[in-house]
Image (cartoon, rainbow, N blue to C red):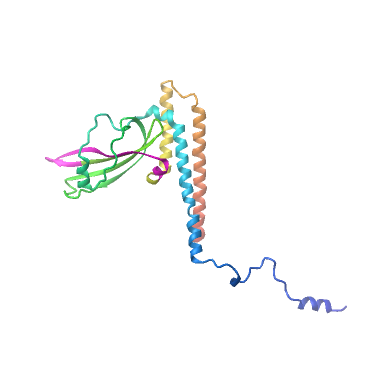
Amino acid sequence: MSEEPKRSEETAPSQAPAHSVAPLEDAEQFTPQMARDFFLSVLDYGREEHEAKAGIIEELVDLLLPEAAAIAQPIRPKNTEDARAPEALEQQFGVTVRERAATWLQEPAVRLAWMTRKLEPRQSSPDQSGGELRRELFMLTDGRLVTVETVGTWYLKDSLRVSGDTLVGAREVDPEEVLRNYDFVSILKVMLETLFDGAAALKLRDKQSPDIVERSGRFFTIIAQVAVSMKENADQLRKVGDTLA
């Protein structure tokens, strides 16, 4: 048997695969500026998430109105007087006094979130006086979201502690601004409690909303979908961290 075919097969030059990568000098270079622009653009997905969460809050507010109205309380009781002049607080603690002439301060509302910050006096000793800035988020019974800022102050007078509150800010906000200052999940939890508490109050009064089943069903569906989405996102982020470890 002739060995010529075998020899030809052994000496034949190998063929380059069809998917071979072109030489580096022929490919478009991925410059540092291109890398910077690319990663800055993909991180804008965080902005899309922020907008999506704002839309969720807006829809849940609409679904919650009857139950929220059932348990709402006035934000500030009528005839509530400020303990200190706002200008004095600016001097003592450096607090910025914002809009104060809000017509809805005595209207009923549900508190959705809050935060506090300790204030140190600029002049007197912290042992003699002090304060705390409170920022609270409320949902009015017509669906508007508002923030109220007060400063709780105290000082010693004849060994007695004298305390009081002063309004330093009150204004309407939109859901996107809400999410820049308050925790999304904490707000959802308070909304969920409001739905249950409000529904129970209306049932006791025999005034339960006729569409409670439909609205609560939609409410629960949104909450469940948010929970699943956040769990999947957390798992994905955890995998990214594990991959880089």
Position in image of residue 115 (x %, y %): 33, 43
Q: Nearer the viewer, residue 102 or 159?
A: 102
Residue lying farthest to the right in this orientation? 1
Q: Is residue 71 above or below residue 51?
A: above
Position in image of residue 71 (x %, y %): 38, 28
Q: Is residue 138 above or below residue 92?
A: above
Would residue 124 appear left or right of 138 to someone viewing this image?
A: left
Position in image of residue 152 (x %, y %): 24, 40
Q: Nearer the viewer, residue 204 or 88?
A: 88
The residues colored magenta run 154-179
Would residue 145 appear left or right of 97 to someone viewing this image?
A: right
Would residue 212 appear left or right of 123 to someone viewing this image?
A: right
Q: Nearer the viewer, residue 29 or 184?
A: 29
Q: Quadrant of residue 164?
A: top left
Q: Is residue 143 above or below residue 16?
A: above
Let me know if residue 168 is in the magenta part: yes
In percent of the image, x 29 and y 32: which residue is there? 76
In percent of the image, x 48 and y 44: which residue is there? 52
Position in image of residue 99 (x %, y %): 29, 40
Residue lying farthest to the top in this orientation? 206
